Amino acid sequence: MASATRSLPVEARGVTVRYGALAALDDVDLTFDGSAPLAVLGANGAGKSVLLRVLHGLVAPSEGGVTWSGASTRPRDQAMVFQRPVLLRRSALANVEYALAVHGVRGRERRERAAEALARVGLEKIASRPARVLSGGEQQRVALARAWATRPRVVYLDEPTASLDPSAAAEVERVMGEMRSAGTAIVFTTHHLGFARRAAAEVVFLDRGRVTERTAVPDFFARPRSPEAAAYLQGELP
Amino acid sequence: MRLPIAASIAAFLLAASSAAAAEDFITVASTTSTEQSGLFKSLLPEAKKALGFDVHVVAVGTGQALDIARRGDADVVFVHDKAAEEKFLAEGYGVKRYDVMYNDFVIVGPKGDPAHAKGTDVVAALEKIAGAKAPFASRGDKSGTDAAEKRYWKEAGIQPAGSWYRETGSGMGPTLNTASGMNAYALTDRGTWLSFRNRGDLVILVEGDAKLFNQYGVMLVNPAKHPHVKKEMGQRFIDWLISPAGQRTIASYRIGGQQLFFPDYKPLAVGR
Amino acid sequence: MHDIGASFVLAYHLATGGDPELWAIVELSLAVSVSSALLACTLGLPLGALVALQQFPGRRALIVAMNALFGLPSVVVGLVVYLMLSRAGPLGSFGILFTPPAIVIAQTVLVTPIVAALARQFVEDAWHEYREQLTSLGVSALRAVPTLLWDLRYSLLTVVLMGLGRATSEVGAVMIVGGNVSGVTRVMTTAIALETEKGDLPLALALGVILLALVVALNAAASVLRDWSLARHG
């Protein structure tokens, strides 16, 4: 049980991830210490989702390695929210409780923290409803509550608003903002540039598996340094 | 997740306890033809009344019944193959053999009797059947009936072979089903025949030959070989079978008004 | 053909006649089959799920073996269990040969591989949906077994029913280890076998109709349960 390791800073060194002949990530060096929320941007197939999974410890690199606070075992104080939430066939509350149970939280504390997490995302009224019959936005918020309930050091979010309508997306943004305020580090990918601008302080731009630049948000959107990033912002890249 | 585990354990224990609780029973290895004649349906309730314990009858072929007894999986063995029973005794697996009753075999065949087998001489009938190569369904399963059939062929000096002689390798019922389906001759015990509903065109053609009498014997499995054998209860069952009450119960069993089994325990004729 | 018609009529009369012997047989059949199915699922579902989720050397070979055991001939199982439970065998001192627990044991041996092989297939197929999320949550393969078994409960109900069906329909192994003792180990299938042997085909068919009706009722109940839960849980 390697729970002593902290999830941050997370450092990727020389990471290459190959799927067959294709390199989804190509010799990527990246360090994230959580001091500022980070958005990972790039065209489709640039490697954004793969990068998040590598940092989270879900995908092992074909070359190079990832360390968390210098250790190479995947730590437990991190969470991830996926584009489509995977919830268990039980109530919303039970889904959040499940994550807490896995983290060793029992009994009354578990129930209370789960209820609190759902309340923070505005879902206290539907706590006992089966999670899978909720709307897309509600399900994503349950996933957020689940991720947040275990008090992770960092939350990775892979296109969290991609399958949501604008009001649901706004809710997700709101919750992410609260996470930030509460001191949880955030790394996310998205195609919604406005969302990226509002929610992140830093941008990493990927092009065909390589990091082409890492810039503060205002500078990135005003004066992107790489031509690929410029083309992306112009809407020329897919 | 816990519920199914608890449920299965409970169910298993229930099933187990219902078996163990009735420690007051004996296991008797007997034959399918005896079971199928329906004798036990009439005999066992009377036995229970007289003895106060249950009798569990496992009905298989004679060979298997004796094998079950050799392994110690039965307390008493009750079959109808004297030669095999005496061998069983000689091997030390049984204590003592008692004659209990006899029934008889008959040869059934198509009403038209193409081989002209009809009569009261079983060996002559088989000679005619073989001569005519008329279809004959045999059990071929090491049972008492099968052993008897093989003895009759041997006496006729015939080794039955050819497409007319079908060994089914199964019990009396299925063999009769086959005979009925093929319009063939067959050797069967009268009991099974009387209860058999699927006769087709078959009727009894040969009966009454003394050679066709089928002697039943009962033995207690030897506790010296198998200490767990329920010897007191087993012996009480045997004693009841050969008692006047038991013998009367055997005689009283009828099918369609016809007596099937003829009790013949003679206390003075000390069976081995 | 008229045999079958006569059997339906006979089946109806038997079922509604309240014949105590018949109901004792039905009760026993249900008791041993449900016990073995439950035991087999208790053993086989976690085993199948674990093989689906955990990587270990020889996993592929084990899966091939599990799938092969699907077709385990029941008379072989009957014979082996008989030899084990016989007084002359290793477990003889328990004295359970020719009693209902012997039937439960034989049927469990038969049904567990079926449940395990099917569960493995179901869980392995569903795993790609859950893998990332559960790994992200820090759930180990072992810990994921009960989670997935519960989450897939409606699909796995099919597996349970298959196990129950297999147990209920078994005759060869039950005959060998049970001995078809009247009132003790005579179940529907062995009763049917006996009546067929005696040539009383209408009765055998009638018993068969009753057995089928039971099995259909069980499956219908499960189907209703599945539909209701699907609507509730999505």
Image (spheres, coloured by chain):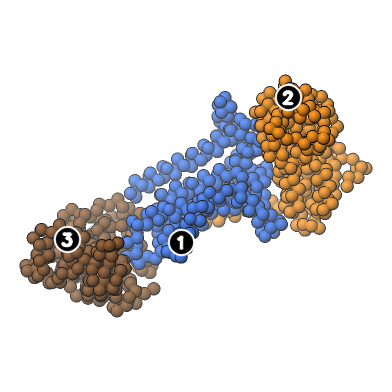
Chain letter, brown in picture? A
Label 2, residues with CA under 10 Å away: few <14, some 14-19, many ≥20:
some
Horizontal side of C127 relative to A121 (left or right) equals right
Tag 1: residue type? Arg
Chain letter, blue in picture? C
Disc 3/disc 1 C-alpha distance (Å): 39 Å
Q: Chain of mark 2?
A: B
* Whole-percent x, y for residue B127 in the image: 80, 29
Say what secondary structure mark 3 lies in.
loop
The quadrant of the picture occupied by the N terminus of chain A is bottom left
Horizontal side of B169 relative to B258 (left or right) equals left
Q: Chain of mark 1?
A: C
Pointer 2 with pointer 1, Cβ within 8 A: no
The residue singled out by tag 1 in the image is C59
Rendered colour, chain B: orange
State which quadrant residue A13 falls in.
Answer: bottom left
The residue singled out by tag 3 in the image is A43
Which one is nearer the viewer's eye here, C84 or B161?
A: B161
Disc 2/disc 3 C-alpha distance (Å): 91 Å
Closest to the camera, between mark 2 and mark 1, is: 1
Q: Residue at x 29, y 71 (%)?
A: A63
The residue singled out by tag 2 in the image is B203
* Whole-percent x, y for residue B178 in the image: 66, 32
